[in-house]
Amino acid sequence: MTLYTAEELKLGDGKNGRPILFAYRGNVYEVSPESKLWKNGLHMGRHMAGTDLTKDMEISPHGIDALSKAKLLGKIVASPLTSIELPHAWVALLLSKHPHPISSHFPIALSVTAALFSIVSILFDLRITELAGVFNLIVATIIMPFTILTGYLSWRYNYQRKNSFEFKAKILLSILLPFSMLGVLCLFGYQYFFTDSYPTGPIHGLYHVLVVTTALNVVALGYFGGRITFPDRR
């Protein structure tokens, strides 16, 4: 059985006629170059040939069944498997359903909608659209903890705490996001429950700035998430 180093495995990236190789639990497998699932060495837009896919396959919906379609070639020398942190069964089941991409769509849509309502309320002096924006943000705030939790679990287990710029940006933005959301709701509550007239002035202006900032925050989170999921499409 042939032994492969990490550098030799990288040569099987499936590009420019090179073979499509990947490692799983210390073994090296080859996929047919005619496979439609591995176009140009890329599977499902995110899994790259020439790499160790152990952690990805452990939590993928199809599991290790995909190995039946691959040819065992040999073993990889000094496999990084020992450093891989595997999730508990319930976490693996949760991650196999891809909860973070699903749940993240709601805060993005709701926050952007809230910002649009906020802008309309400024332009046309419509209180009703401002209230509609707040209701959107309330729902987004309720959903956000689950979105952040699934994002953390995905970073920890799917990406093994990868420390790239994209992840650093997402972590920072995720820390700031709850503060901006709660700030919006607190300012709204203060204006409408502790003042006698329709809100105006600096506090009201700060409220609208925070609404728009919150929307920009979640859009940036989605952008960096896209760069992580599709690294070849920058």
Image (cartoon, rainbow, N blue to C red):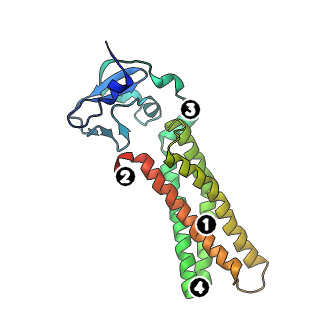
Q: In which quarter of the image is the N terminus?
A: top left
Label 4 crowd bin: few (<14), some (14–19), many (20+), radius 10 Å: some
Q: Which of marks 3 and 2 is in front?
A: 2
Q: Which image quadrant is residue 77 in? A: top left
- Looking at the image, do the residues carrying marks 3 and 2 touch, with CB atoms under 8 Å apart? no
Q: Residue at position x 34%, y 42% from top? A: 44
Q: Mark 3 points at which residue?
A: 87
Relative placement, left or right, of 19 versus 145 is left
Measure the C-alpha gap from mark 3 to mark 4.
49 Å
Q: Do the residues labelled 1 and 4 touch (CB within 8 Å)?
A: no
**The residue under label 1 is which amino acid type?**
Leu
Q: Name the residue: 78% across, 85% down.
A: 196
Percent x, y of residue 138: 64, 65
Q: What amino acid is found at the position of numbered circle 2 in the picture?
A: Arg
Q: Tell me the residue that label 1 is attached to.
A: 137
Q: Indicate the position of residue 136 as horizontal and vertical percent values.
A: 58, 68
Q: Is mark 2 on a helix, strand or loop?
A: loop
Mark 3 surroundings: few (<14), some (14-19) or many (≥20) residues within 10 A? some
Q: In this view, does 122 lie above or below 28?
A: below
Q: Name the residue under label 2.
A: 234
Under circle 3, the secondary element is loop
Residue 224's tag is none
**SS category of the residue bearing label 4:** loop
Q: Is mark 1 on a helix, strand or loop?
A: helix
